[in-house]
Image (cartoon, rainbow, N blue to C red):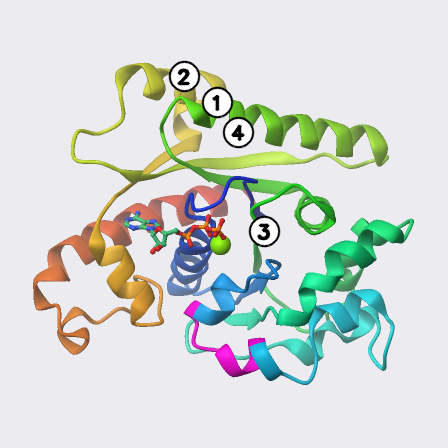
């Protein structure tokens, strides 16, 4: 199963959610690949692959543009194996991809075609999307046909979601046989006072209560990302934050619930 963690709004927690969902699924024994489809490389940098991002020999650009030695069948060559899950890293060169994919008639379909040709076998592929609507974000939606969107639980979220779902409708109209399902809404960075009754009601009635999850706004989330792991491999003692232990447990439960839900859909 492929899941696009997508939302055209910046800073809502796409990368954090991608890392922790991938970690949760891996923790449950699955083979997981996380694809960094964002040219800004948040997932790649946060996973500690700065050299690959800046100076790696090959990039997704090379695979999807087929301008050099690599072609759509060579995505395997980009994979970096990790302790928790594997990743297809981003590369600074991927900024050129947006322009390139725009100009090609079937550009947005290349990520899907390339994933279809992976020889490595994964139970789940999680795609971290860029914070805009463009051919890379569209490509991730088409490749996964499943979207999980992180969102802040504020009133602007409704507008952002409307834009996302308009884009999904457009893609479904444009491409035959494409049907993009909503996997979950993850209300991220929920503050101490929780989600307002009105917003909770709106999310639950729009997507169905069992599709809506909440992740608190806790510095532990940042600590675990800074430790370069998901919350599942985060060791608060080793990181120097022993007091994070209890909240680490709570966060693992939250992301495990999302992973369980994903398993039930697949
Ligand atoms: N639940 C949380 N609690 C505390 N901090 C969080 C939480 N989720 C995300 N953050 C922090 O918020 C910032 C933005 O998160 P993240 O990078 O995951 O968002 P994004 O949607 O991927 O951003 P971009 O659109 O730039 O790619 C990061 O510094 C991250 O560590
Ligand atoms: Mg990001």
Q: Main secondary structure of the magenta part?
A: helix
- Judge whether residue 124 can be spotted in this image: yes
- Among the two numbered marks 1 and 2 on one chain, the one whose residue lies closer to the N terminus: 1
Q: Secondary structure at mark 1?
A: helix
Residue drawn at x 40%, y 55% is: 16
Q: Report the residue marked by disc 2.
A: 202
Q: Report the residue marked by disc 4.
A: 160
- Among the two numbered marks 3 and 1 on one chain, the one whose residue lies closer to the N terminus: 3
Furthest toward the right, the residue is 105
Q: Is residue 139 above or below residue 192?
A: below
Q: CA distance from mark 1 to mark 4?
A: 6 Å
Give me the disc on residue 158. Answer: 1
Q: Secondary structure at mark 3?
A: loop
Q: Is residue 44 above or below residue 125?
A: below
User: Is mark 4 in CB contact (under 8 Å) with mark 3?
Assistant: no
Q: Secondary structure at mark 2?
A: helix
Q: Which residues are magenta?
A: 46-53
Q: CA distance from mark 3 to mark 2?
A: 26 Å
Q: CA distance from mark 1 to mark 2?
A: 9 Å
| Near-viewer residue (13 or 206) | 13
Residue drawn at x 52%, y 83% is: 51
User: Is mark 1 in CB contact (under 8 Å) with mark 2?
Assistant: yes
| Near-viewer residue (198 or 159) | 159
Query: In the visual, does 188 lie left or right of 142?
Result: left
The crowding category of the residue bearing disc 2, from other C-alpha atoms within 10 Å (few below 14, some 14 to 19, many at least 20), is some
Q: Is residue 51 found inside the magenta-colored segment of the image? A: yes
- Judge whether residue 85 can be spotted in this image: no
Query: Where is residue 208, by image quadrant?
Result: top left
Q: CA distance from mark 3 to mark 1?
A: 19 Å
Q: Report the residue marked by disc 3.
A: 130
């Amino acid at each position: 199963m492929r899941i696009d963690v997508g939302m055209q709004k910046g800073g809502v927690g796409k990368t954090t959610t991608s890392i922790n969902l991938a970690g949760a699924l891996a923790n449950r024994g699955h083979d997981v690949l996380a694809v960094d489809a964002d040219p800004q490389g948040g997932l790649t940098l946060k996973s500690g692959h700065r050299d690959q991002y800046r100076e790696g020999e090959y990039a997704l650009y090379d695979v999807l543009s087929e301008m050099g030695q690599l072609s759509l069948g060579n995505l395997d060559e980009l994979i970096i194996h990790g302790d928790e899950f594997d990743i297809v890293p981003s590369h600074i060169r991927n900024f050129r991809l947006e322009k390139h994919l725009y100009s090609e008639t079937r550009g947005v379909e290349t990520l899907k075609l390339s994933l279809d040709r992976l020889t490595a076998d994964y139970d789940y592929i999680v795609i971290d999307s860029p914070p805009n609507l463009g051919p890379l974000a569209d490509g991730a939606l088409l490749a996964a046909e499943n979207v999980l969107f992180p969102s802040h639980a504020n009133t602007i979220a409704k507008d952002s979601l409307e834009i996302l779902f308009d884009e999904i409708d457009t893609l479904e109209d444009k491409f035959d046989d494409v049907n993009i399902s909503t996997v979950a809404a993850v209300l991220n960075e929920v503050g101490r006072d929780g989600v307002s009754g009105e917003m909770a009601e709106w999310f639950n009635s729009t997507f169905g209560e069992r599709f809506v999850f909440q992740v608190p706004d806790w510095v532990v989330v940042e600590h675990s990302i800074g430790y370069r792991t998901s919350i599942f491999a985060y060791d608060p003692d080793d990181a120097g934050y022993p007091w994070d232990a209890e909240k680490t447990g709570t966060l693992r439960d939250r992301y495990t619930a999302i992973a369980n839900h994903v398993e039930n859909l697949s």
